[in-house]
Structure formats: structure tokens, C-alpha cells
Image: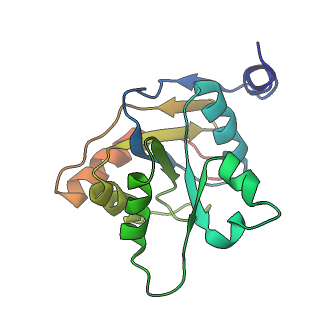
Amino acid sequence: MGITRFIFFKILGWSIQGKFDPSIKKSVVIVVPHTSWHDFYIGVFARRISKTQINFIAKKELFKPPFGWYFRWMGGAPLDRTPGQKKVISIAKVFDAHDEFRLALAPEGTRKKVDTWKTGFYYIAKTANVPVIPVAFDYKTKTVFINKAYYLTNDVVKDIKNLELYYTNISGRVK
């Protein structure tokens, strides 16, 4: 057992249910609930254990020296966040620049508990023509749930309601 698996399973006591379909090379991975900074390292451990490339986007300034190499190594892609940018289109174009790109996003848009998701993830997936993969971090059971890909329709309200069903009875670290 490698050090990552030992820490994740034995020391932290987490488990993983489900797996990423290796044939799906591009997707938007939504991680819900996102209520704590602890989600970052739980996600990094789960990503490494699943042996699946999961990416993120961040402001382009983070990709300059001295730490730019680290953010790229971790799967990051720079994004120009200056005003006037069409961010959904810009992010969707990042998919075109890669043979494999799974973009992790938190639909809540914050680490606080929210009642309504932001829809950017939806429009990014639609514009990039990629499925959404719902992932849940359940702190009550210490389980990462990796669900099957969800292919969006043209009904944003229906799709978001269907995606929210994956998170019924899931407890974030902060309630």
C-alpha cells in the first residue's frame, strides 16, 4: 500500500465508492458540498488514488514564478480574469487545448453552505460539449462518491435538479 493510500484509508479513515470511466477524457467534475478547505486535500488524495487526471482553473497570476510550475504540475490551467472576458467561452476553450481535461468545480461558488448553485459549471459543460461527473465528499461517512457521467439536456432547470439528487443525504464538513 502506497503512502497516499495509507494516509487516506488508514489514518484519515476515508473510503471511495465508484470510479471515473477511463474512456471519458473530458468532463466537468462537480464536487459538492464544498464547505471546508479540507476538501482540497481530500480531493487530491482521491484523485491520486483513482489514478485519474483531474484539473482546475485559477487566475493566471498564480502560474508565474516562483510557484507556477507547482500549479501546472497539480493540473492547473491559467485563466485571464480581467473584466470583459467571456469566462464560460474562455474556460470551454481550455478543453480544446488538451487531449484529456477533467475540470473540477464547486457549483456553490464558495465554501459556505448555499441554497442555490451557480450555473457556470453547467454552461461550461454545455459550451465544451462534455458531460458532468457528480462527486460528493460525505464527511459523515467519510466517503468520496464518484458517480457516473451525466449528459446534459437543453433544460437547465431539469438538469440541475437531477444533479442535485446525487447529493441527497450528503454531509459537508461544515453544516
Which residue is more in the foreground, 81 or 157? 81
Side of 80 relative to 41 (left or right) = left
Which residue is more in the foreground, 91 or 38? 91
Which residue is more in the foreground, 32 or 58? 58
Visible in this render: residue 51? yes
The x and y percentages for residue 67 are 79, 60
Side of 44 relative to 30 (left or right) = right
Q: Residue drawn at (48%, 39%), measured in percent from left and top?
A: 135
Q: Does 130 sit above or below residue 60?
A: above
The x and y percentages for residue 84 are 44, 87
Which residue is more in the foreground, 59 or 136? 59
Visible in this render: residue 116? no
Q: Residue drawn at (42%, 66%), measured in percent from left and top?
A: 118
Q: Does 37 sit above or below residue 119?
A: above
Q: Does 82 sit above or below residue 175?
A: below
The x and y percentages for residue 16 are 58, 25
